[in-house]
Image (cartoon, rainbow, N blue to C red):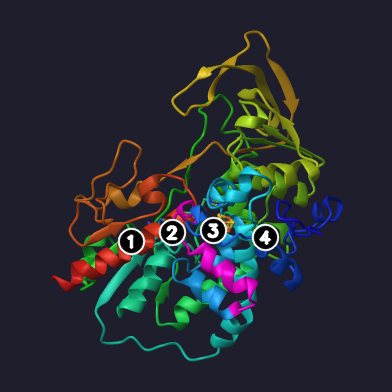
Amino acid sequence: MSDRFTAIHMKEQPAEDRRKNFSEVPCGYTEEEAILEANRCLQCKNAPCIEGCPVAIDIRSFIGHLQKREFDKAINKIYEADILPCVTGRVCPQESQCQARCVLDKKGDAVSIGSLERYVADRDLDRRREALKDAPVDVSGKTKVAVIGSGPAGIACAADLNRYGYDVTIFEAFHKAGGVLTYGIPEFRLPKAIVDVEINSLVQTGVKLVPNALTGRSFTIDELMAEDYKAVFVGSGAGLPQFMNIPGENLNNVYSANEFLTRVNLMKAHRYPEYDTPVKHGKNCAVIGGGNVALDVARTAIRLGSEKVYLIYRRSQEEMPARHEEIRHALEEGMELLALTNPVAYHGDESGFLEKIECVKMELGEPDDSGRRRPIVKEGSNFFIEADVCVVSVGSTPNPLIAMTTPLLETTKWGTIKVDDNGMTTMPGVFAGGDIVTGAATVITAMGAGRTAAASMHEYIKKL
Ligand code: FAD
Ligand code: SF4
Ligand code: SF4
């Protein structure tokens, strides 16, 4: 039952079941649940929720259509601003974006905008799968443009450029498209079958996809421009893992989150030996970090069969940047949170394999630049955690390859590419957006940046 102030929560796989499988955790709404939840929306005149959405979806209108069971109108309203609603409805940090601005949030539960978005988008999946049977659209003879990287920024940019009438080619370094949606976010949060529909839909509209094409190594941006690509969009993300530079990081079985998740999500290591790539998950697996990536690693390790999974985080649980829902899910699944704890060294056996992690206890001091209280080491608090695998998830930065091989591209001191308000870089005709510009951020902001850049590329080419 619901009243105006209490949300209908999606049913979820019980923790005991889901810790043994990779299937999606929330089960999605039934039609009746979706309508009940939609009916909580007050259809506010000024709809402050819309300001909370980075791409300004007309939330009030789409929920209004849902209230009247006008499902086609609801999804079309969403598509006006968001071309990946199956994805954003699942992974957006809604509670700090659209839902944080919902008027009901002050008095009770905000309207579950993300869950409603997911419901409407999932309802449209069958129609979209059916449309994939049509032959790909022929775009030959049209003006050529290139997109580097097939994550949300690249997908959104390519889709809009295709709509503007260009012959779009996406060059992707990996053998499979999708960026973090494919290799980072695990199946139990974002089923890969959904990402496949998004990619295949793009290809069906005439966008060409070239896998295993590492820009900066296979070819340079200058070479692309010389091949008559009139404009290039760089959406190559921020996939270079950071480490803490503490002793022992080179020991066997100390992974970066990027490598650990890629082995499982992209190379299907959880189905080894059916697939070629193995991954060591360990009996005792420690994960360093407190963001969504660290939580994804911890929950993956639980599913792979680690007996103990520790999350080592230097601040307190309240300061963890991960979504609250992910933290709740992970704790329910058995992850042990070691808050106010920081690793200082890894210790291995004589063969170079990790055996234990030396940690210190932390306490919180004054707020730092991020506004969060600074963690301070408690002197003399060193202790050891037995761990045969450790996954370091303390952030990532852009890979410097493209900037290094494109002399006219200016970067910031963090290695991100500099752009103007239109998404244009310091090299004429070359645009950029997503994590390569902002540093690690979110799917919806990357998608928004891809769309802004596509509009600017269109204007730029019209003036050539
Ligand atoms: P990416 O998704 O990183 O895509 C970049 C693509 O470019 C990749 O496919 C890469 O292979 C390719 N590439 C890189 N270099 C080259 C090159 N030289 N040549 C050709 N191709 C290249 N965000 C959320 O909103 N919600 C979440 O719950 C969430 N969870 C996350 C969990 C994990 C594990 C990770 C890693 C990130 C998560 N994020 C989440 C962040 C979000 O996924 C990213 O902000 C978003 O994917 C950025 O999109 P992008 O297109 O800029 O880059
Ligand atoms: Fe909310 Fe994200 Fe959907 Fe925007 S895209 S309405 S922020 S869930
Ligand atoms: Fe509906 Fe909340 Fe938006 Fe008002 S603020 S229109 S109640 S979702």
Label disc, if present, on residue 351 of the rendered structure: none
Q: Identify the element where label 2 is drawn.
A: loop
Q: Identify the element where label 4 is drawn.
A: loop
Ligand 3 under 8 Å from disc 3 Cβ: yes
Label 1 or label 4, whichever lies nearer to me, is 4
Please say if the residues under marks 1 and 2 sit with CB atoms less than 8 Å apart. no
Q: Identify the element where label 3 is drawn.
A: loop
Q: CA distance from mark 3 to mark 2?
A: 19 Å
Residue at image x 64%, y 31%? 318
Residue 185 place in picture, x, y as percent: 60, 55
Viewer-proximal residue among 208 and 273? 208
Does residue 169 appear anywhere in the picture?
A: yes
Label 1 or label 2, whichever lies nearer to me, is 2
Kindly identify the amino acid type of the residue bearing the numbered disc 3. Cys
Kindly identify the amino acid type of the residue bearing the numbered disc 2. Val
Q: Is residue 172 above or below residue 411?
A: below
Q: CA distance from mark 3 to mark 1?
A: 28 Å
Q: CA distance from mark 2 to mark 4?
A: 23 Å
> Mark 3 = which residue?
44
Q: Earlier in the sequence, mark 1 or mark 2?
A: 2
Viewer-proximal residue among 363 and 100? 100
Residue 79 place in picture, x, y as percent: 48, 72
Please say if the residues under marks 3 and 4 sit with CB atoms less than 8 Å apart. no
Ligand 2 under 8 Å from disc 2 Cβ: yes
Residue 430 place in picture, x, y as percent: 24, 60
Ligand 3 under 8 Å from disc 4 Cβ: yes
Q: Is residue 42 magenta?
A: no
Kindly identify the amino acid type of the residue bearing the numbered disc 4. Arg
> Mark 1 = which residue?
452
Q: Earlier in the sequence, mark 3 or mark 2?
A: 3
Label disc, if present, on residue 40 of the rendered structure: 4
Label 3 or label 2, whichever lies nearer to me, is 3
